[in-house]
Image (cartoon, rainbow, N blue to C red):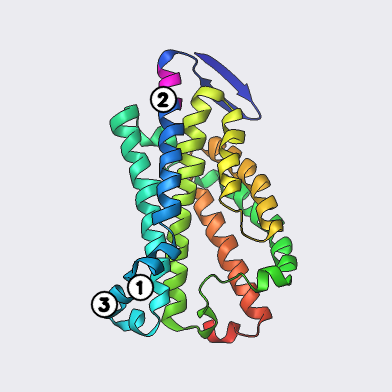
């Protein structure tokens, strides 16, 4: 086992048989989970499967008047299960380690909040600028009736935010910590590859920014030993983009 300090990090990098096995488990299970989530965990599957009508008819209320919003609640729930809970189960039952060693922790993260706040401060003017691009104005918010405001908008946002819990747990937790135990800081780079790829199809500037964000958030997760602060940063960026776009479209008053 090699202990390698660098960039204010002190990583335990192992190159024994168990480390190889654990890295294999992380990479293969992550690949399978990405596959399952892509085909059966996203909003478009909810719509194609007919659940859009079943939930609307069964639950009524906001879903009855805005059946499309249920797709984003489903998206958030799928992300929690496939990207957060199942990886945690793999850590415990297959890798036989503590989820705390994979970033599932809150204690001790408060002192790292300024770094995440600084990252948001740097990103805000960029968000303000790109929110004026036609590609962003036509893409955000995802829910096509978000501009109407009301309970449906906030239900959409809640599903959207829970989706980010899964994103951070999966990429900055399961993959980053799992690979760093074998590859050190190179694990952040490996994680950034699939993280960037899930942004394909989004506006090109956002897909490119995902490369920088993946590297930065991966490093901050290892430094704070937690992916949790990244959730709040990611949610903050997402709601900021939605609100800026709605403001530019003249619909912000419907929300506030």
Is residue 7 among what the camera can see? yes
Measuring 54% from the left and 14% from the top, which residue is drawn there? 2
* In-image side of 57 versus 166 (left or right): left
Q: Nearer the viewer, residue 228 or 37?
A: 37
Q: Name the quarter where the C terminus is drawn.
A: bottom right
Q: Nearer the viewer, residue 241 or 74?
A: 74
Neighbours of disc 2 within 10 Å: few (<14), some (14-19), many (20+)? many
Measuring 42% from the left and 74% from the top, which residue is drawn there? 69
User: Does the magenta segment cover residue 20?
Assistant: yes
Residue 20 % position (x, y):
45, 19
Measuring 45% from the left and 45% from the top, which residue is drawn there? 34
- From the image, tell me which residue sits under label 1: 52
Gap between marks 3 and 2 measured at Cα: 42 Å
Residue segment shown in magenta? 18-23
Gap between marks 1 and 2 measured at Cα: 39 Å
The residue tagged with tag 1: helix, strand or loop?
helix
Residue 79 % position (x, y):
41, 54
Neighbours of disc 1 within 10 Å: few (<14), some (14-19), many (20+)? many
Measuring 61% from the left and 78% from the top, which residue is drawn there? 246
User: Does the magenta segment cover residue 56?
Assistant: no
Dot 1 or dot 2, earlier in sequence: 2
* Residue 77 higher or lower than 103, as above or below: below
- From the image, tell me which residue sits under label 2: 22
Dot 3 or dot 1, earlier in sequence: 1
Q: Nearer the viewer, residue 92 or 55?
A: 55
- Main structural element of the magenta stretch: helix, strand or loop? helix
Which residue reaches farthest left?
58
Q: Nearer the viewer, mark 3 or mark 1?
A: 1
Neighbours of disc 3 within 10 Å: few (<14), some (14-19), many (20+)? few
- From the image, tell me which residue sits under label 3: 59
Labels 3 and 2 touching (C-beta < 8 A): no
């Amino acid at each position: 086992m090699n202990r390698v300090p660098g960039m204010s990090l002190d990583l335990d990098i192992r190159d024994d048989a168990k480390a190889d096995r654990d890295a294999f488990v992380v990479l293969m299970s992550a690949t399978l989970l990405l596959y399952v989530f892509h085909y059966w965990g996203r909003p478009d599957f909810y719509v194609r499967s007919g659940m859009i009508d079943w939930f609307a008819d069964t639950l009524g209320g906001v879903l009855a008047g805005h059946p499309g919003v249920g797709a984003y609640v489903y998206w958030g729930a799928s992300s929690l299960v496939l990207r957060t809970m199942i990886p945690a189960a793999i850590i415990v039952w297959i890798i036989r380690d503590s989820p705390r060693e994979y970033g599932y922790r809150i204690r001790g993260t408060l002192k790292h909040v300024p770094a995440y706040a600084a990252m948001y401060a740097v990103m805000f003017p960029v968000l303000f600028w790109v929110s004026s691009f036609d590609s962003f104005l036509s893409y955000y918010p995802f829910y096509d009736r978000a501009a109407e405001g009301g309970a449906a908008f906030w239900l959409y946002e809640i599903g959207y935010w829970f989706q980010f819990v899964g994103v951070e747990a999966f990429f900055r937790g399961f993959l980053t910590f799992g690979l760093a135990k074998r590859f050190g800081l190179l694990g952040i780079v490996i994680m950034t590859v699939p993280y960037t790829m899930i942004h394909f199809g989004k506006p090109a500037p956002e897909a490119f920014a995902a490369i920088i964000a993946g590297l930065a958030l991966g490093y901050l997760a290892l430094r704070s030993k937690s992916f949790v602060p990244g959730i709040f940063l990611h949610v903050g960026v997402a709601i900021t983009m939605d609100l800026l776009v709605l403001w530019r479209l003249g619909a912000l008053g419907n929300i506030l």
